Structure formats: C-alpha cells, structure tokens
Image: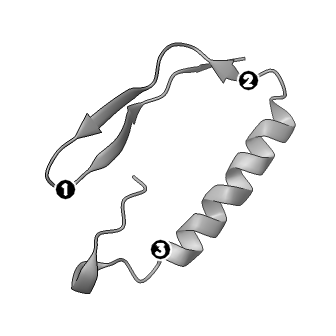
Amino acid sequence: NVTFGAGIHFCIGAPLARIELQESLRVLFERLPDIRLGGAPRYRDSFHFHGLERLECRW
C-alpha cells in the first residue's frame, strides 16, 4: 500500500516510505535485470484511491 492520505490525515511517515520504495526498486532492478511486465497494468479508481491495482511482472 503506497497511499498516504491527504490533508490532516496525511501520513507522517510518507517521506521515509517514498525513500524506502526508491531504494527497493533500485535493488529490484539491479538484481533482476530481465524483469518485464507480464501483462497490462490494472488501475483502480475509487473515492479514496487512484492508482495501480495490479502489476504483473516476469523475469
């Protein structure tokens, strides 16, 4: 889950989580250089969330 809320409910840990995600992705692509999409990304739109619902990968 990478949603952080908004306004008064914004997650205080969001900046740290974003840094952790960037580093995690860097390591993922370094260790799996042949990673690729396994299908079309699936998005979800609702009142509280807009973003990827599913992202299949293959390597």
Marks 2 and 3 in Cβ contact (< 8 Å)? no
Image position, residue 28 (x, y; %): 74, 40
Marks 1 and 2 in Cβ contact (< 8 Å)? no
Q: Nearer the viewer, mark 3 or mark 1?
A: 1
Sequence-wise first label, 3 or 1 = 3
* Residue where numbered disc 2 is placed: 35
Residue type at numbered disc 3: Ala
Sequence-wise first label, 2 or 3 = 3
Image position, residue 57 (x, y; %): 59, 22
**Image point (68%, 58%), residue name:** 22
- Seen in the picture, residue 27 relative to 38 is either above or below; the reply is below
Q: Quadrant of residue 6?
A: bottom left
User: Residue lying furthest left in this view?
Assistant: 47
- Seen in the picture, residue 36 relative to 1 is either above or below; the reply is above
* Residue where numbered disc 3 is placed: 14
Q: Is residue 37 left or right of residue 2?
A: right
Q: Is residue 29 left or right of residue 8?
A: right
Marks 3 and 1 in Cβ contact (< 8 Å)? no
Q: Nearer the viewer, residue 32 or 6?
A: 6
- Real-space CA distance between mark 2 and mark 3, rounded to the nearest whole angstrom: 27 Å
**Image point (64%, 64%), residue name:** 20
